[in-house]
Amino acid sequence: TNRLPEFTSIHWHGQRLPNGMDGVKGLTQPGINPGKTFVYEFETKRPGTFMYHPHADEMTQMAMGMMGFWVTHPKDPKFMAVDRDFVFLLNAYDIAPGRYTPKITTMLDFNLWAFSSRIAPGIYPLVARKGDRVRLRVGNLTMTKHPMHVHCHEFVVVGTDVGWTPPNS
């Protein structure tokens, strides 16, 4: 149900679904008017990490946090099993000092980076035990890139089509 004062829609990234459920306003569906409801119905057959966001006034609606992740797990819970599975979505904002609302007309002049809508120092630590297999699922729906690093860990890069890749010794 659209509780915004303007129309919206939801576009689903990476999932194979019927064209009428793709959420691209004016192309695959009409916009969802304020106070109206549209039910998206599709089966998530592909396991993986997926993102969604509006496809109507994206700069404003996404700047105000209308985006997210969802994870479809494989049918076999033992397939590429991990001990810890972390998901975070990157976002960036242009916010004037002392203000709380992003400047939506200048969203390419980012000055704050958020991880799952949280900004440092309010970002939660990713806690794992020594020897744990950890999966990091990172999505970026911003208009730019941001360098990142994690300290003191050996990484094994895994592609969903490849499976586990052993670390170099």
Image (cartoon, rainbow, N blue to C red):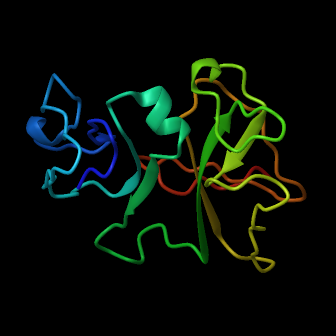
Task: Classify residue 148 as left or right of residue 81.
Answer: right
Q: At x 41% / y 70%, what residue is drawn?
A: 79
- Closer-to-camera residue (147/92): 92
Residue at image x 63%, y 48%? 157
Q: What x and y, as percent, mark residue 142?
A: 58, 31
Residue 88 vertical placement versus 94 (above, below): below
Image quarter for residue 12? Answer: top left
Give residue 70's position: percent from left, percent from top.
Answer: 40, 58
Q: In this orientation, which residue lies closer to the viewer: 55 or 2?
A: 2
Left or right: 77 with respect to 124? left
Q: Name above or below for residue 130 compared with residue 151.
A: below
Residue 74: image location, x then y, percent: 33, 67
Give the residue displayed 79% in from the left and 62% down from the top: 122
The quarter in which the N terminus is drawn is bottom left
Q: Residue furthest right?
A: 152
43 lies above or below 139: below
Q: Is residue 151 left or right of residue 44?
A: right
Q: In the rendered image, which quarter is residue 105 located in? A: top right
| Residue drawn 42% across the image and 29% down it | 58
| Residue nearest the observer in this picture, 155 or 144 | 144
Most foreground residue, 61 or 19 = 61
- Number of disc labels: 0
